[in-house]
Image: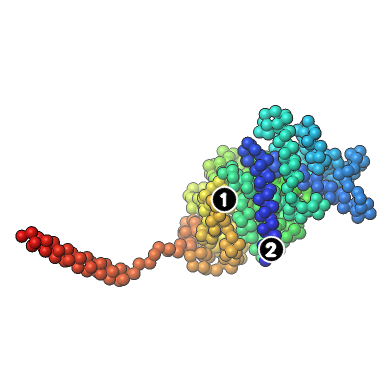
Amino acid sequence: MIDTKKEQERDELHRAIWAIADDLRGAVDGWDFKNYILGTMFYRYISETLTNYINEGEEKAGNVDFDFAKMRDEEAEEAREGLVGEQGFFILPSELFCNVRERAASDENLNETLERVFRHIEESAKGTFSENQFSGLFDDFDVNSNKLGSTVAKRNEKLLKLLNGVADMNLGDARHHDIDAFGDAYEYLMNMYASNAGKSGGEFFTPADVSELLTRLGTVGKTEINKVYDPACGSGSLLLKAEKILGRNAIRNGFYGQEINITTYNLCRINMFVHGIEFNRFNIACEDTLIAPQHWDEEPFDLIVSNPPYSIKWAGDDNPLLINDPRFAPAGVLAPKSKADLAFIMHSLSWLASNGAAAIVCFPGIMYRGGAEKKIRKYLIDNNFVDCVIQLPSNLFFGTSIATCIMVLKKNKPDNSIMFIDASNECVKVTNNNKLTKENMDRIVNAFADRKEIQYFAHLAPYDEVSGNDYNLSISTYVEAKDTREKIDIVKLNAEIREIVAREQVLRDEIDKIIAEIEGGRE
């Protein structure tokens, strides 16, 4: 049951946070400014997290008045190695968010101070197990950018406003803040930046309702999984949704993803941290998944959820090595160079555990186009890897109004049928976009799990039917659309027409009579 009061408080907090973020940017474009506001939130988060961790340890040891933030740097240095091993990073007391902010108004070199602090945080993990999680995390927080101001003084003025604005965000008591407060606020801000940024925003963020649907589809019948993976992870919202749905301890071995855009890659790693995912429970890589996959050595994944970029160009058969790549070779053909969609599908299938499920958002064209794409579909269908295809409503994603699909892949299906679900009308309109409600998602997931015929909504097609349709996977081929046109009663319509004609004849007779009388009077 939803706690209405808590939801209302959450909405109010979000509005307040967005008002602060929007005010801080001033003349800077919101999309450009997002890295500053999100980076400052992260700096505050890890400062408070480390302080809380140390203070709680001291309290348990009986030192109830201890406060790491007030400790001398020289004394704190003694604990550096141990803390990096436990938390993955270290921050000197003088470089904590609260202390830098306290001195910021009188710091003429605030830009240099922040640059040094961020470099020290990243360097604290160097040479340790957590190095990859922290390396380059603050690269997109350019303290000397002209976007912040044309002079050092103006830039420092903006940086001071940033520190104060993020400090004013009501994210709870620093010692006991709600585990979801930072992550929730961070994700809300990314959602707002994406929705206000048009196409560029949609490239890195999958709306929460779509993320939830994908995860629910991929975890039907499961209470825990080994790992969750996203080969085009963007800011990581899909990966994190798995924990929200299954529970904090239900993902045994962590979160894995790959992202080609370095700025988005940094956002993703920060997103992991602010959602309370420990440094040793996630592995996010920055590379081209199709050309240089970074998780070859991992055991296959129980859950794969993804919203890869639609119909992007890739090397394809220009790269002679790819046709022998064990991910793509089984289909005997590569996805077209101008449309990499099915390359992502084949990659995900290769990374999927034998008892796992992959739920992937797809461009609808891959369901019916010919050529190499048809050959890949044939491979997938002949080998019984396609479990379900779902037609989604249009206008669900930021920056595109296209009606996408979901393909669910499995390796050990109990039958050779494919479930087709037409969910094109399962949505409500919210401002400029459509949105999936809980009821919409429930109906889709229930139909997916039950695998039963539902008129105008769901159809279970045996292999022979799909192969007989020339391996076409378009929903309209299998699910009859409900005829919403008004039904016309022909008998009733004819009677009405006769009545109209009869009335018309009476009127004509009356008019003729009047005309005859007028003409008779003239004589």
SS assignment at label 1: loop
Residue drawn at (25%, 67%) of the image: 500
Residue 349 at x, y percent in the picture: 62, 53
Location of residue 98 in the rendering, given as x and y in whole percent from the top left corner: 81, 43
**Which residue is identified by label 1?**
397
Circle number at residue 3: 2
Pick the residue in front: 238 or 437: 437
Q: Is residue 31 left or right of residue 500?
A: right
At label 2, which amino acid type do we have?
Asp
Q: Residue at x 84, y 50 (%)?
A: 52
The 10 Å Cα crowd at callout 2, few under 14, some 14 to 19, many 20 or more, is few
Residue 169: horizontal and vertical position, in percent? 73, 48
Q: Quadrant of the N terminus?
A: bottom right
Disc ID at residue 208 = none
In the figure, 93 relative to 473: above or below? above
Q: Mark 1: few, some, or many residues within 10 Å (few <14, many ≥20)?
A: many
264 relative position to 59: left or right: left
Residue occupying the point 57% across, 62% down = 440
Q: Residue furthest right?
A: 62
Asked whether disc 1 touches disc 2, contact meaning CB atoms under 8 Å apart, the reply is no
Q: Is residue 346 above or below residue 286?
A: below
- Does residue 416 appear anywhere in the picture? no
